[in-house]
Image (tube, grey):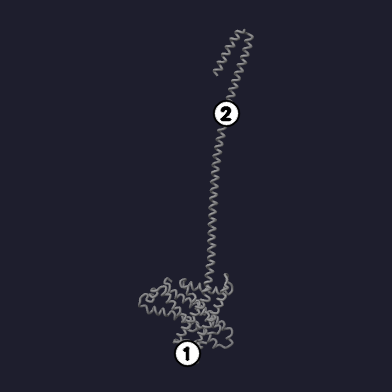
Amino acid sequence: MLNVDNIWVVYVAGVEIWITETILNTWIIMLFLIGLAVIARIKFKSFQEIPRGFQNAIEVVVEIFDNFAVSTIGPTLSYLAPWFFAVFALILFSALSSIFGLRAPTADWATTFALALATFGLMVAMGLKYRRGAYLKTYIDPHWIFFPMNLIGELAKPVALSFRLYGNMLSGTIILTLYYALTPRFVQIGIPAFLHAFFDVLFGALQTYIFVIISLMFIRLAADDNW
Amino acid sequence: MQNLIFLAQAVPDGRVFGLDSQTLIQIGIQLLNAILLAAALGYLLYNPVKEFMQKRTDRIQKQMDDAEAAKARAEELIAEYKQKLSEIDREREEIFEAARLRAAEERKAIIAEAKQEALEQKQRVSESIAAQKERLKEEARLYIIEAASLMAEKYIAQTIDDQIQDKLFAEALAQLEEAQWLH
């Protein structure tokens, strides 16, 4: 439970690739989310002017997230909202997947660093797109002698972002693994529900929010010099 | 194809954390997974729903704007009609005022005319009275003359002969004619 198990080892053009539990669980979560999206898309054709039931739920989710993302990142960068919607859904459902006995993909550093790397890539890209030279100048600000420190500071952002989420999710996994391993059977009924609710649902939602809002702020900070 | 992709028989043990080429590959795979998920959710769910809601918002906004414009037009019309009503009131007041002034002038003219007419009437009556008075005086004088003549004739007839009578008559007649002439 604590280790990230390898399910398959695939050789692609001579390169060894480990298909881990994390990757498999990510695919399961992706299938679930894409399945939901397909259902929503099918029902979308019969969407009414006044929303009800399933349509209402879909609209609430999209609207709340869009308002949150746009208010944080600003209207200019609002086209990035779908990416962060997917990131939000992936991290949240990764945490929730623990309830169903799956090892959370976000309890693997490869997942969290991949997402943090995307944030870093977007941060640099948006900085260069909207501020060009002014963004590059931040690396030698206030003097070129500070370049190494500024560079380390920038590179530390995705590392810190990924380890924050990874550490929090792994800690929940460790605690629950220890609980299941060290407690007698009779206390493994009922009580774990509260632990899962706390570590998976509450911590999961909180860490999802923190990861996404910090990512949005990093990108906004890079792209908007008035912010 | 079989040489390109194939499954290995032996699977290495799992681990909690590692920093090697496999970690890099898994980061790449997870990044690709996230991109695929974002593309799928964006295409299937996020963008269509957002577009649908945006169109609905625009439609409702347009309806609200139209209603606002209609309200503004109605208020404009109300203001216009109020303006017209106030103008009509003002015109009515002006007409009333003009009519009052004209009536007052006409009253004055009528009174003045009546006064003039009364004055003329009075003048005419006065003149008529004066003429009547004169006529009565003349008649009275003639009557007195006639009576005096008769009396004188009777007296003379009793006292004087025909010769004196003729002489006196001729004198009296001459006097009368003279007096009449002087009048």
Q: Which mark is residue A144?
A: none
Q: Quadrant of the C terminus of chain B?
A: top right
Q: Is residue A199 visible?
A: no
Give the residue at the far bottom of this rendering: B10
Can you give x and y, in whole percent of width and height, for residue A129 in the image? 42, 74
- Residue under the image location 47 percent in, 85 percent down: B26
- Determine which residue is flagged by label 1: B3
Total numbered labels placed on residues in the image: 2
**Rendered view: B71 above or below A142:** above
Q: CA distance from mark 1 to mark 2?
A: 151 Å
**Rendered view: B152 above or below B82:** above
- Determine which residue is flagged by label 2: B124
Can you give x and y, in whole percent of width and height, for residue A185 in the image? 58, 88
Amino acid of disc 2? Arg
Determine whether the residue tagged by mark 2 lies in a helix, strand or loop: helix
In front: A6, or B70?
B70
Amino acid of disc 1? Asn
Give the residue at the far front of this rendering: B1
Please tell me if label 1 and label 2 are on a single chain: yes
- Residue under the image location 46 percent in, 77 percent down: A215
